[in-house]
Amino acid sequence: MAGQGLQHRRRRVVVLFSLPFQGHLNPMLKLASLLAARGLGVTVLHTDFNAPDPTRHPAGLAFVPIHETLPGEATSPYSHILTKLLALNAACEAPFREVLASLLMRARHRDDDVACAVVDGQCYAARRRRARQEQLDEPVPDHDPLRVRDLIRVDGCDDDEHCSFITSVADAVRAAASGIVINTFDAIEASELTKLQSELSLPAFAVGPLHMLKFQAPPVEQSLHEPDRGCLPWLDTHPPRSVIYVSLGSLACGDRLVFDEMAWGLAASGVPFLWVVRPGLVITGSGDDDEAPPPPLPEGFEEETRGRGRIVKWAPQREVLAHASVGVFWTHCGWNSTLESVCEGVPMLVQPCFGDQMVTARYVTHEWGVGMEVGEVIERGKVAEAVAEVMVGEDGALMRERARHLKMEASAATGSAMDGLVRYILSL
Ligand code: UDP
């Protein structure tokens, strides 16, 4: 949150900018509508790529494109995540600054004060060198419950490049921010929030879980893909807590081998499943077309699981997680997915793929106790065992009980941090 001192006390305006990924746009747009509902003027700057649809948002929000020129590697579902992040950052920097400058200029001629900009940003503890195998299970000092293996990791890229990206993000926060807005809530990360506040000497506002906050703000739906709602009546036909919902989010992509083992593990588990198999989920190396079809299922898989499984390209995830027949969420631990699962009291089977997902997975399994790992290596036999354990095993029952408690804590989050944030913005 970058501060901007101004002389006049007129209508306070907040400018928001998110990277054009599903998991970034959802909470940022929700924050935008909550701020607008509290009387602030809100301008959402956005890329042309994955541009939000203004007609699906409250009339009070202004949408301004930055008209970036993105190279193919920024948008291809097959590019490495770090390649995407670097390309997006490089392509957006100049147009973002230009549009922001002209916005500030125009605001001076109107009855508007731009109080601050809320921009995408994260602060990570990055490791400098790839850890040796034998260090992987060692605890990270001062970061209980994390082990070295849980630290943020992006496989398949140069460590130094990754490290310097994270350092730039952290440096930008230290140099320019007046505060930090975080989509979390005290009951799950109180000590981490205190630590962050004192390390950065900045106020931190835990305004989450954003998707649950309805107070004075209409619900925000900003799915980049059309959800297949046919899975909801399919879920209706199943008994309570009998289905496993499987989704690795909007960005993760993996090997064909892993995909096949997931499929055969699901088949061997005997458990009904709803599985999001989206284009780009499997690295094919063939082309970079966003409209590409989803990866084909392994031969014989559909016959083997007929009547027991439902495959969709994109699910109405929050409705799915809220559905009574969903018993477990097999997730990559993207932050939004994790919060959505926590808020519905659904225990998790975790398969972190990259970045902060490792950290989140460790919290899910060892701090909050609401999930277990699918396994370090995805192998059909282990997958089937893990699915059975979390669905009907004793450990699974404990996780479900804890998840039920966490759901109650989440629903008790009142939005008071939002009020504190608005007061702070008005004071800038
Ligand atoms: N999502 C969805 N349908 C799907 C898969 C994902 O609506 O089939 C939504 C999900 O509810 C979440 C977002 O996409 O809000 C994914 O964000 P997350 O942070 O979990 O993961 P990312 O996609 O950034 O890796």
Image: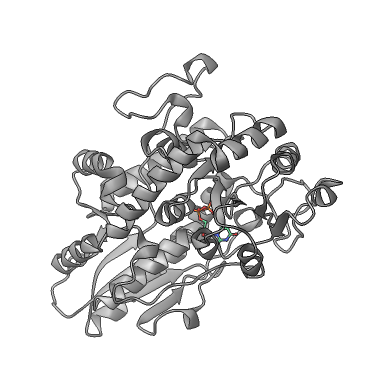
Q: What percent of the width, then of the height, locates residue 37? A: 29, 77
Tell which residue pokes out farthest to the front in this image: 239
Frontmost residue, 14 versus 277: 277
The vertical placement of 239 against 100, above or below, is above
The vertical placement of 60 against 397, above or below, is below
* Number of dots carrying numbers: 0
Q: Is residue 277 left or right of residue 120?
A: right
Considering the image in quadrants, where does the C terminus appear?
A: bottom left
Q: Is residue 261 left or right of residue 22?
A: right
Question: Where on the picture, by quarter, is residue 27?
Answer: bottom left
At 44% from the left and 72% from the top, the residue drawn is: 220
Q: What percent of the width, then of the height, locates residue 151? A: 44, 32
Question: Where on the picture, by quarter, is residue 258?
Answer: top right
The vertical placement of 191 against 112, above or below, is above
Q: Is residue 357 left or right of residue 421?
A: right
At 30% from the left and 44% from the top, the residue drawn is: 189
Q: What percent of the width, then of the height, locates residue 89? A: 48, 54
Q: What percent of the width, then of the height, locates residue 243? A: 61, 53
Q: Is residue 36 visible?
A: yes
